[in-house]
Image (cartoon, rainbow, N blue to C red):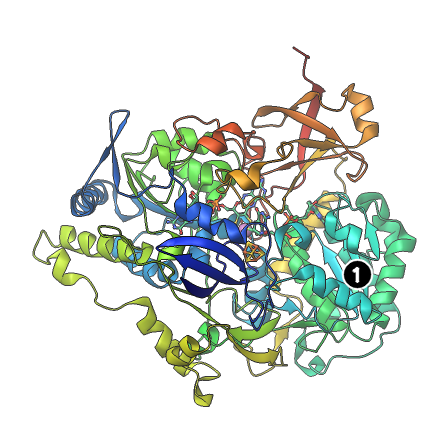
Amino acid sequence: MGTVYRSCTLCEAICGLEIKVEDGVIKGIRGDSADVFSHGHICPKGPELKAIHEDPDRLKFPLKRVGDKWEQVAWETAFSEIAARLHVIQTASGQDSVAYYAGNPNVHNYGSLLFAPRLMKAIKTRNIYSATSVDQLPHHFAALKMFGHPLLVPVPDVDRTDYFLILGANPMASNGSMMTAPDMRGRMKGIQKRGGKIVVVDPRKTETADLADEHVFVRPGKDVYFLLSILHVVLAGEKKKTSRLESIFQGADFVRSLVQDYSPEKTQAHTGISAETTRRIATQFAQAKSAVAYGRIGVSTQTFGGLCHWLINVLNAITGNLDEPGGAMFSLPAVDTIAAEGKRESFGSFDSYRSKARNLPEFGGELPVSALADEILFQGEGGVRALITSAGNPVLSTPNGGKLAQALESLQLMVSIDIYLNETTKYAHYILPPTSPLEHDHYDIVFNMLAVRNTARYSPPVFDPPAGTMHDWEIFTALTAAMEEARSGGAKKASSARAKIKPTDFLDRMLKSGPYGSNGLNFQKLVENPHGVDFGPLVPVLPARLKTIDGQIDLAPDLMRRDIERAREAMKETPAGMILIGRRNLRDNNSWMHNIPRLMNGSPRCTLFIHPEDAAKFGISDGHEAIVRSRVGEIRLPVEIVEEIMPGVVSIPHGYGHKKSGTKMSTAQKHAGVSINDLTDDSSLDELTGNAAFNGVPVEIRAASVS
Ligand SMILES: Nc1nc2c(c(=O)[nH]1)N[C@H]1C(S)=C(S)[C@@H](COP(=O)(O)OP(=O)(O)OC[C@H]3O[C@@H](n4cnc5c(=O)[nH]c(N)nc54)[C@H](O)[C@@H]3O)O[C@H]1N2
Ligand SMILES: Nc1nc2c(c(=O)[nH]1)N[C@H]1C(S)=C(S)[C@@H](COP(=O)(O)OP(=O)(O)OC[C@H]3O[C@@H](n4cnc5c(=O)[nH]c(N)nc54)[C@H](O)[C@@H]3O)O[C@H]1N2
Ligand code: SF4
Ligand SMILES: [Mo]
């Protein structure tokens, strides 16, 4: 019997786990009460790492599709065949004819993060995509333009704030995002115990809104006008405090004159939020001892995502809450990739090239994944002919997934690095399955960067990898070497070219050169502290940590100044009929955990939430099915009539639609549901950042005939 302490890699909360193992079998997984950050908190998904590990449907060896059959293939054969074909395709159709898509679990896997870039470099393509452009791209965009680095993303200091304004986030379901904070329920209760206040702005009265002091319905996609009006009131009234950083703010005059046009009286018809409510929230925010505005998926994945995150940062800054305790702060992570980059002219690129078919701008070396289907379908020079996916399920997770699925069928070669045969990987010619999450080690590079407290923790593997299996990072290394060999016409031997370096070698180096290295932090120190090392609450880090060339904070970047005109124009549009938004459930994890029986019991979750007034209007009764149609598609699903959704709005969770046959997962097949992304529109983007606009999709609803 042994006990392994490690952190959970399923979501951003990085909870500490205590895993009991006997004779090579997991006997129990529970929260690690000694974890310096999560103190024993977990959610129902954490213990299911055992079920993922033991899932008979999880792939264990490489597969090759021959006709419509899957055959087992040796790793070395797969690598050399793939590399040879990629080389032929690139020789015939150019380097950019090979595309790469990285899905969400990559950021929960430090081996992938450290070794995937080597493969990118070997492939030398501009057609790189990831889940970033269906998720948090607007945060990075605002961070780059305002603070000079895409990763300088402020996080709400929830443990000290007196006023927490939440827009479009539901941490009670998601466990927090771009805000690593295990036990958000406890932390939110802490705010209220201190006498603080929580206000939630959301078109649905969510589980988080239920916990808050106030919930305000907002029309989907109209937050930008609410934020402008909040700033209107704040800048016209008295503020409790001014910012310590005011002397390095640029563009404050632009903001001041801009928001004059957006009185709450003028925007209330657009937002659905009364002028009186907006005025009260603005005044409370400005008068609070400390306050922080925080926005997530609801305001990131909509047509004004970039503007929303810019205005949220501006609000925190001008009320004196940027880089101050209780406000929007920056982490100082033990592995500090931002500081490690040193000084140079520009961090992160934008619009240095564009996608071939859609002419959409690159950000940070990536193109918007909403463009991927069109780039594959593009027949001219520069079209995508081959695709590598890693830990991604874009058929279910990107807008107009049905169109993408069709496009995938036309690829000359598709390779998927994935643990399952699913709605996306079924189109691959080769599936390369890595080891299970419990068979490799981990250090959270990404989420410590977004954490509400500075801590560090190393996760050792629970099991040795079975013979003949490979970790994600080893697959990247092997593919990289195979590509180099194919390019050199065999002169450079793949096996000898393989790097001997392991993720832990990087980790030790990064910890030593990080902010706590001089105090003795290194890999060994983390191994000796299995429950983590605590460096305390967040500390002010500006202006030192800024990466802007002039050392200033730009409150009104040029691109935002220009994009605000788009929002102004949109005020003239007549409101559409019914509007579709998304939602998450605590027991889901995007598209890929529906094969876990214990997470799937209870009533079906892939349902349409509709307000009683609307249900009556469309003649839909509870338990019946509705047909939902958008510009791009139509789906049919069961209805739940609920008061918690705003009239005029309907909601469907994403990640379902497992009947897209050819997949193996038996439990997921039973709870198949339908895909909201057969309705979301690949042509509807945040035009500023290129991020997908999942929220605010115009739809038509009708009752399905009862059979
Ligand atoms: N309508 C709508 N669509 C959305 C969203 C929404 O709110 N609404 N949210 C968006 C967001 S925020 C995100 S992040 C994306 C997610 O988009 P994706 O990342 O494309 O989708 P996931 O469902 O996370 O798929 C993860 C894949 O990784 C595989 N996998 C799991 N663990 C590992 C591993 O350790 N190694 C490897 N190699 N593979 C692994 C799984 O089998 C699965 O195929 O979805 C987006 N889509
Ligand atoms: N259980 C579970 N946890 C997860 C995931 C999961 O799939 N399941 N996915 C993980 C991932 S990849 C991510 S990125 C995070 C996301 O973390 P969150 O952003 O906290 O997740 P959501 O529950 O999608 O919350 C988005 C909220 O925005 C609201 N909303 C929709 N449209 C609008 C709008 O126009 N304006 C406003 N103000 N609100 C709007 C929705 O009603 C919803 O309540 O969750 C992570 N954690
Ligand atoms: S909250 Fe997230 S990190 Fe914590 S146990 Fe649940 S899935 Fe894992
Ligand atoms: Mo995400």
SS at mark 1 in the image: strand
Name the residue rendered at 69%, 74% in the picture. 322
Q: Is residue 169 visible?
A: no
Residue 302, percent from left and from top: 64, 46
**Image height check: is 516 above or below 612?**
below
Residue 457, percent from left and from top: 48, 71
**Image height check: is 108 above or below 501?**
above
The quarter of the rendered structure image containing the N terminus is: bottom left
Residue sticking out furthest to the right: 276
Residue 502, percent from left and from top: 28, 67
Examine the image and state in which quarter residue 323 appears: bottom right
Report whether 345 appears left or right of 455. Answer: left
Residue sticking out furthest to the left: 491
Name the residue rendered at 71%, 72% in the picture. 327
Report whether 451 appears left or right of 95. Answer: right
**Front in this rendered view, residue 224 or 152:** 152
**Front in this rendered view, residue 366 or 582:** 582
Residue 415, percent from left and from top: 30, 41
**Amino acid type of the residue tagged 1 in the rendering:** Ile
Q: Is residue 46 visible?
A: yes
The residue that mark 1 highlights is: 198
Name the residue rendered at 45%, 50% in the picture. 50
Examine the image and state in which quarter residue 512 appears: bottom left
- Mark 1 CB lies closer than 8 A to ligand 2: no
Image label count: 1
Report whether 685 appears left or right of 371. Answer: right
